[in-house]
């Protein structure tokens, strides 16, 4: 993590304990921090903020799979098999 960086801890897809040493990771960066990502409703303001960051080039969504909506089962299979590095996007 770079100085002043932020790592967002999102989910636990493998349902196993994390192997990240959060104490050590938090001391390797000047003013860096690790935060847990929690979801609350409504989503609108948060999604608008994220879209704004994407549009400004300040957020890299790291899309690893993109396809049409009718390929949703293929996307889910790829995610579950951990064949996707990054996000999966379904086009509507």
Image: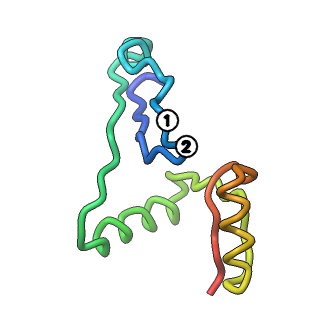
The part of the image, by quadrant, that contains residue 35 is: top left
- The residue lying toward the viewer, choosing from 80 and 5, is 80
The Cα atoms of the two marked residues, 2 and 1, are separated by: 5 Å
The part of the image, by quadrant, that contains residue 90 is: bottom right
Numbered tag placed on residue 64 in the rendering: none
Q: Identify the residue shown where x is 41% and y is 41%.
A: 8
* Left or right: residue 50 compared with residue 45: right
* Left or right: residue 3 compared with residue 76: left
Residue 9, percent from left and from top: 41, 40
Q: From what the image shows, is residue 26 above or below residue 34?
A: above
Look at the image and tell me in which quarter the C terminus lies: bottom right
Q: From what the image shows, is residue 8 above or below residue 65?
A: above
Q: Identify the residue shown where x is 32% and y is 21%.
A: 31
The part of the image, by quadrant, that contains residue 27 is: top left
Q: From what the image shows, is residue 38 above or below residue 41?
A: above
Residue 81, percent from left and from top: 71, 53
Q: Identify the residue shown where x is 38% and y is 27%.
A: 4
Residue 67, percent from left and from top: 74, 75
* Left or right: residue 37 compared with residue 67: left
* Left or right: residue 19 compared with residue 73: left
Quickly name the residue at label 2.
14
- The residue lying toward the viewer, choosing from 45 and 87, is 87
Q: Do residues under tags 2 and 1 come within 8 Å of each other at their CB atoms?
A: yes
Q: Identify the residue shown where x is 43% and y is 66%.
A: 52
Determine the secondary structure under disc 1. loop
- The residue lying toward the viewer, choosing from 17 and 5, is 17
Determine the secondary structure under disc 2. loop
Residue 32, percent from left and from top: 37, 25
- Label 2 crowding class (10 Å Cα cut-off): few <14, some 14-19, many 20+? few
Quickly name the residue at label 1.
16
């Amino acid at each position: 993590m770079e100085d002043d960086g932020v790592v967002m801890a999102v989910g636990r897809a493998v349902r196993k304990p994390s192997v990240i040493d959060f104490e050590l990771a938090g001391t390797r960066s000047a003013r860096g921090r690790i935060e847990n990502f929690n979801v609350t409703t409504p989503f609108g303001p948060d999604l608008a903020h994220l879209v704004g960051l994407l549009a400004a080039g300040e957020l890299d969504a790291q899309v690893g799979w993109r396809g049409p909506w009718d390929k949703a089962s293929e996307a889910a299979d790829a995610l579950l098999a951990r064949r996707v590095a990054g996000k999966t996007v379904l086009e509507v």
